[in-house]
Image (cartoon, helix red, strand yellow):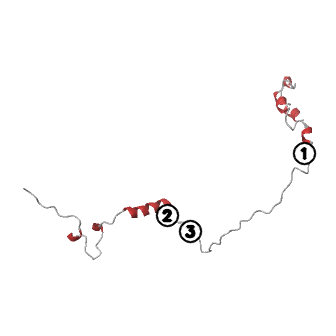
Amino acid sequence: MVIDNLCRNVPKEYNRPSNNPIAEFLSGLPSYNPSNFTKCSEDSGNRICIKKPSVYLPTRDYASEQIIVTEKTTILLRYLHQHWDKNQPDRKRDYVSANGDSEDDPSTHNKRPRLDNTV
């Protein structure tokens, strides 16, 4: 029996059922009482159900031209570049005007020269 195998290494003073904590613990388990297995039949237990595995059938037809490509820049860098371009205003002094004037031309500056108002 299972309890006898477990109780081999227990001292003899604990081999009596009233003093043996292992025997008390295992006394109600189904492996101890063989009548607990009479309701089980060999046929009802290990049935193997053989089914075909489910197959995914797409409902939409996607073009074969769609190719997944990994981008070389990270999402964070792309985001920062986009917002940098949006937030940086074009400055006239940084660029040559459309009619070919250089940035040294005083007519293209927004600033007015300071007037000397000494009294």
Q: State which mark lies toward you, 2 or 1.
A: 1
Give me the residue at 75% from left, 63% from top: 54
Q: Residues within 10 Å of mark 2 (few under 14, many from 20)?
A: few
In the image, residue 85 above or below residue 30: below
- Of the two numbered discs 2 and 1 on the same chain, state the one appearing first in sequence: 1
Residue where numbered disc 1 is placed: 40
Q: Residues within 10 Å of mark 1 (few under 14, many from 20)?
A: few
Would residue 113 be found to the left or right of residue 8 on screen? left
The quadrant in which residue 82 appears is bottom left
Residue where numbered disc 3 is placed: 69
- Helix, strand or loop at label 1? It is loop
In the image, residue 62 above or below residue 20: below
- Helix, strand or loop at label 2? It is loop
Q: CA distance from mark 1 to mark 3?
A: 58 Å
- Can residue 93 be seen in this snapshot? yes
Give me the residue at 55% from left, 66% from top: 70
Would residue 25 be found to the left or right of residue 42 on screen? left
Residue that protrudes farthest toward the bottom in the picture: 99
Residue where numbered disc 2 is placed: 73
Would residue 25 be found to the left or right of residue 63 on screen? right
The quadrant in which residue 105 appears is bottom left
Residue 28 screen position, x and y as percent: 85, 33
Q: CA distance from mark 2 to mark 1?
A: 64 Å
Give me the residue at 80% from left, 63% from top: 52
Q: State which mark lies toward you, 1 or 3.
A: 1
The quadrant in which residue 111 appears is bottom left
Three-letter amino acid code at the position of disc 1: Cys
- Can residue 9 be seen in this snapshot? no
Three-letter amino acid code at the position of disc 2: Thr
Q: Residues within 10 Å of mark 3 (few under 14, many from 20)?
A: few
**As rendered, which of 74 and 100 lies closer to the eye?**
100
Three-letter amino acid code at the position of disc 3: Val
